[in-house]
Image (cartoon, coloured by chain):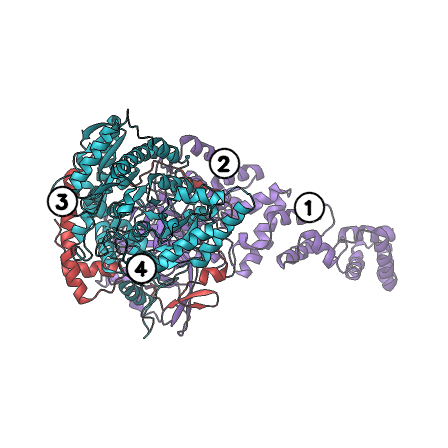
Amino acid sequence: MTLSTSDVLDYDEVLERFDPVLGLEVHVELSTRTKMFCGCPTTFGAEPNTQVCPVCLGLPGSLPVVNGKAVESAIRIGLALGCEIAPWCRFARKNYFYPDMPKNFQTSQYDEPIAFNGELVLELADGETVVVGIERAHMEEDTGKSLHVGGATGRIHGAEHSLLDYNRAGVPLIEIVTKPIVGTGARAPEVARAYVTALRDLLRALDVSDVRMDQGSLRCDANVSLMPKGATVFGTRTETKNVNSLRSVERAVRYEMTRQAAVLVGGGEILQETRHFDESTGTTSAGRRKETSEDYRYFPEPDLVPIAPSPEWVEELRATLPEMPWQRRKRVQADWGLSDLELRDLVNAGAIDLVAATVDAGASPDQARAWWGNYLAQEANSRGVELPDLPITPAQVARVAALVAEGTLTNKLAREVVDGVLAGEGEPDAVVAARGLEVVSDDSALYAAIDEALAAQPDVADKIRGGKVQAAGAIVGAVMKATRGQADAKRVRELVLERCG
Amino acid sequence: MSELIRLTAAELAARIHSGEVSSVEVTRAHLDRIAQIDPAVHAFLHVDTDGALAAARAVDEDVAAGRPVASPLAGVPLALKDVFTTEGIPTTCGSRILQNWVPPYDATLVRKLREAGVVVLGKTNMDEFAMGSSTENSAYGVTHNPWDLDRIPGGSGGGSSAALAAFEAPLAIGTDTGGSIRQPASVTGTVGVKPTYGGVSRYGLVAFSSSLDQGGPCARTVLDAALLHEVIGGHDPLDSTSIDAPVPPVVAAAREGAAGDLRGVRVGVVREFSGEWYQAGVISAFNRAVDVLRELGAEVVEVSCPHFDYGLPAYYLIAPSECSSNLARFDAMRYGLRVGDENGNSAEQVMSLTREAGFGAEVKRRIMIGTYALSSGYYDAYYGQAQKVRTLIARDFAAAFENVDVLVSPTTPTTAFPIGERVDDPVAMYRADLCTIPANLAGTPAMSVPAGLSEQDGLPVGLQVMAPALQEQRMYRVAAAYEVARDRAEGGPFINRVPELEVAR
Amino acid sequence: MPNISRDEVAHLARLARLAVTEDELDMFAGQLDVILQSVASVGEVAAQDIPPTSHAVRLTNVFREDEPRPGLAQQQALAGAPAVEDGRFRVPRILGEES
């Protein structure tokens, strides 16, 4: 698809004429062991239709039973977002036909969400804070997955038939919906990204989800509308789906703003519709127009009894809340003596939690910051993944730092060890052993290498003996080469000088 | 005809457990009877000869080895309504859309029956997805009332009630959403019990209206129903609406009632259950039954439950609404019928073609009514209002039970009507549930016990006895006392008045 | 209040995925109208202050432990399917939301 200039309006011009309004709906798959309403496992990537039972296949006669752990997670998420917890609420059936939904209704919550009316405070890259209101967080179940066969693109359009796997059907989901986000102007795309990032960090701290956007355990739908500058009545919104990375959240919002502005400026109307984001082009496209307007015919789920969390239970769960990311940021800044700028760099790199966890595992704050902020950040960047998704844990980084501190590894060797861990060669100690990376700290071995080097370069040896200490560099270099870099250069230099002393 | 098929479940159990007769003999007698008579009655959709005989043999082995039998009903045959899932045995719900569907799991109730050593003979006919009052809505043909083969056996559980009245089984299982156990019992002269909602697990009961459906026992005597009630009742962690409390002591109550003393029991006659829709013969049989209760020592008072009149309209909004959602899963994707998968038809088209071909007219009617009642513009006026009526009816029950122990009424306004009479008049058909619906809406237990024959047409009339939630023992006691008095007056078991069926040889 | 037209019946049938015939549309239009009139009386009785009853039992907080339970084997899960391919349910092409 090619973009003609009339498809989108220049971003600056958009902002001169319009104010954007955002609404973000995030679906989080909980990392419970079993599904929302049955005892099937939730592990990602199993053989198709092997994690199913009569309940999640929607077989006639089957009945749901609520996973108590999922309710706990929902309440904890609600509390962490500063929400009120409903003293009494019900599940509801959302009725619509779709082959990936075994019962042709989704068991969800409608007008009685378990958590409502909260907020999340975001910090943008330059330190500006934005408060995003949370409308609600409610419980529901995921759908199965379809595979489209035939047709040119392998996509749904043009496919000859489809294949369904219901392993994911019934996995617990929490849907978190913001209140309308207004007044962010040019920063709307950035705010959208910062919101999803902050929410992801919060959910990770709560340990309720894998929050992997690439695997779909965190999914974002972005509602965008424009209103003429200064207006108070919101424009018609579109809902963009298929936004599968933090970067895409930002791009999708930005694109929709420029597209909608072009339509409006051209005298057109925005249709309230679902649009799909295309990662490759950075554009959105309209979904299939439905013959009839959606009417979900919600009604209270008769097969499940109401949920009535007692104040005592809610307080018990509140007591389990970990330190929140923003609290942690304040604390680590003080503990580690960081400047605002240093802190922001770490936050922007998504490294705070990782650094903190590395410190918790025994590394010094400086070492931990250096690893995550530099070498690993570059590595993540070159791999095109988020820092937390690198296959190395804070505990492993802390172990490498410890090996450096005790002199077993040089910084150069340490990077090799980290490379080994990233390459899946196992724990740091195993990499050291397998790759033979230990520092040569045996002085007798070093003496032998030094004597050899001195013998090979007698003129240099003479210069050193004659007091030209800087000439020692050539000998140190030769020794380092001979030991394949596994010697501590500083120690070698000491020994060379001693030998020639 | 073997004498064994005339015995009650309690009598059969006693003989099987004492070794006097084997369960295999009993089972064979019933299988023979089915083979002989069912072409005329058509109570069964599927007979599981091998499974039944295997279950019977297992009980006989226990008896022969001197091991304790699995339950007081071990070895006794039973007819199972084809709405409960049975692993390895077809389950159709009387619908074409589930033709040949073999479930991969047993309903909790079925598991309990198997664990109790009850011999499941097969699956009985029913109105499609339990929607109906005559069993004429089955995709697999009508069932005939053994009292008059040209008449309906009630519905939706007409297969189960007919099987009992035709002596094809001494026990049966039904489900009752608006009267589908009690009304068939009434028109076939048998006993049918709708337990307290949540008293019997719904796991594996293919849902019609989830907030109303309740499985329950059917039999020819009150004691047999009680024995079966205790086998199938009790808490099930797979059903979130299952009540975690002991099964009420219904067997003890049936035995106590059989002593024939109802002194101290207060019986309320519901004033609202009479009027233009009630046959005179039904009313007079009911009045005679109330007289018998009085003679047994009960104190009888008239009680008004003013909102019961709104039960029928509320029911015919709630049940279709829930069914429109419950039956959405029958879409040709994962199981059951698939029609029109050709010419590049889309999944959506195949769904619509399959549902059109697979559902009968009554099911379609109710799905559309329910779809309408749940629509955004109509929800408050229909579904919302109906749910409020539920509250009012529950309050009427609560107020009534402050003054009386049980309530009584006719079970259904008429005796068995002729096959075909109401098929084109849905609203007339719906009136069969007039008296039974309030208990479903309130979740309270109720049962039907035969109250003799209507002097108008010589067909059975049912006495409905209703009790508060989890107080089933009250109604069992009253029904058992009445049953004994009735049979004493009649000079023998009422069911023996069912005519001998003419069997094509 | 109810007066349900043929068009409305057609709309309901579409929502409910029923490919009803023209004859059925005529039949159902008349019947649904009669049924809805006969149930309209629920509007007469229940006042504002009456709470609706969605559940006949007064239970709350019925939960299951987060413990895996054995489910169905793939072959059992697919046994009743009209069509199967590669361990999955094979269904006709889906008209998706994607364009």
Q: Amino acid at mark 4?
A: Ser
Q: Is residue A350 above or below residue B98?
A: above
Residue pointed to by mark 2 = A320
Q: Residue at x 30, y 48 (%)?
A: B209
Residue pointed to by mark 4 = B95
Residue B399 showing in the rendered view: no
Q: Nearer the viewer, residue B126 or A432?
A: B126
Distance in Å between CA atoms under marks 3 and 4 = 30 Å
Per the image, label 2 sits on a secondary structure element best described as loop
- Same-subunit check for callouts 3 and 4: yes
Q: Residue at x 31, y 38 (%)?
A: B445
Residue pointed to by mark 3 = B277
Chain rendered red:
C
Q: Amino acid at mark 1?
A: Ala
* Neighbours of disc 2 within 10 Å: few (<14), some (14-19), many (20+): few
Distance in Å between CA atoms under marks 1 and 4 = 70 Å
Circle 3 or circle 4, nearest the eye:
3
Left or right, residue B187 beside residue A239: left
Residue pointed to by mark 1 = A402
Q: How many marks?
A: 4
Q: Amino acid at mark 2?
A: Thr
Q: Can you give x and y, in whole percent of width and height, for residue C9 in the image? A: 18, 59
Q: Residue at x 70, y 48 (%)?
A: A404
Q: Is residue A408 above or below residue C50?
A: below
Q: Do residues under tags 2 and 4 come within 8 Å of each other at their CB atoms?
A: no
Circle 1 or circle 2, nearest the eye:
2
